[in-house]
Amino acid sequence: MLILLLFILLFKNISLIPLYDDESAHYGQIKLFYEGNYRVYENISVIPLYHLTLSWSAKILKTDSVQILRTVSFIFSLFSIIIFYKLSSLLDFNNSVLKTAQFAFLPVFFPYRFLLYVENLAVLLLLISLYFLFQKRFFFSSLFLLMTVATKQIYIVWLPLFMLLPFIRGQTLNWKLCLRQNWLNFLTLLLFIIFMIANRGVAIGTQSAHPDFFLSLGNLYWALFLFFILFLPLILKTMPQIFFSLKKYPGLILAALLFLTVSWFAFHSSHPWNQFPEHLRNLVLMSAKQGIGKFLFLMAAILALLTLCFQSLLKRKYYIIYPLSIMSLATIWLIESRYALPAFTFFLLFRRTGNKIIEILILCLFMIFSGYLYWGYLNQLFYF
């Protein structure tokens, strides 16, 4: 409740600023729908369910003011925190409050909670779908997952999580039961394929910036770097285990050196939109193009990866989020922090928390970074 009250105060403070970052494109699409024009705005890359939802809200409220639209979007964000808490209570009740606070202040999401961003609705729908899955309400889970994909189509990569999670228990897969529970998920997949064929790609209005089947590991390395920064207390706590394992198993040193060597040639940030220094991520990426900057960036990614090897999840079946996270990040050319949002969200939800002091330090670090990003967006000083 305290978090929700704090967020309402923060929203009230930022809701009156001019349109910022990607908001102009989103508002342009919402306004077209509000005026009864159902063409797709030229700079929109997603299926515009988010924009259609906000335009309906605007018609009900009889205003298309930016502040009102931001309020509706912000309400989606608040509900995502509530649903995350409900999920966390189901999976790990004793740590649900702390986990929810970490999710609420997750810097990858935080500054966009108060603005017109698709993720506010997409993450809410994704979490609702997962909640119904754990409640064994499979039709509603599939229905909300369909709406999730219709809000942000790249979230289709998480479809296997929802289809397979109930069956990853070590026994023989019951195909009849799987088909009965997942018929709507199969329909979602079919509709997505039809959409791709009709649209000639995944992205809608910015296909040249988002080519299909483009293998690029940039987002994967960036997500690992973000993990290093955001979970630094956990990494420092895990360092003795890492050094002990490297000493006990020298082959791990060779594996780490091989990873560093391959990464040196595999990592690059060549997308034109990653060349603008007003984005904080681009400043880091540009400094990591060569020399010592690239070495430090990749070493941070290696330490993050090694730390993840020692991080336990609540159940073995939840480890499916790791290959799906790789799949969700390895096919996108543009390096963008928000692409890692589902991966971070599921990690926070499914991880086994450890020392309370470490967890509180992680939360404090989240709050510091989120506070800095909020200040920058409030004063329109930079983008993330």
Image (spheres, rainbow, N blue to C red):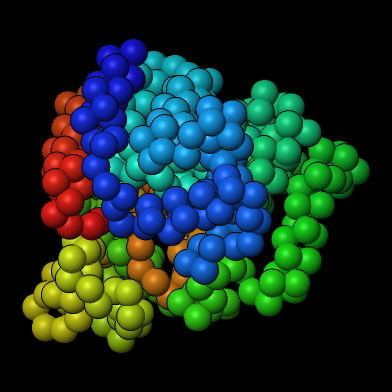
At x 54% / y 76%, what residue is drawn? 207
Please determine whether, in this image, residue 275 is positioned above or below residue 60: below
At x 75% / y 72%, what residue is drawn? 198
Asked if one can make out residue 48 in the rendered structure from this viewpoint, the answer is yes
Please determine whether, in this image, residue 11 is positioned above or below residue 250: above
Quadrant of the image for the N terminus?
top left
The x and y percentages for residue 184 are 81, 44
Quadrant of the image for the C terminus?
bottom left
At x 16% / y 38%, what residue is drawn? 371
At x 52% / y 49%, what residue is drawn? 30
Nearest to the observer: residue 72 or residue 376? 72
The x and y percentages for residue 33 are 60, 49
Residue at the right extreme?
A: 176
The x and y percentages for residue 330 are 47, 69
Is residue 201 found left or right of 205 in the rendered image? right
Nearest to the observer: residue 39 or residue 45? 39
Nearest to the observer: residue 329 or residue 301? 329
Please determine whether, in this image, residue 209 is positioned above or below residue 228: below
Asked if one can make out residue 299 in the rendered structure from this viewpoint, the answer is no
The x and y percentages for residue 11 are 28, 30
Is residue 189 found left or right of 346 in the rendered image? right
Nearest to the observer: residue 71 or residue 137? 71
Residue at the left extreme?
A: 292
State the image quarter where residue 282 is shown: bottom left
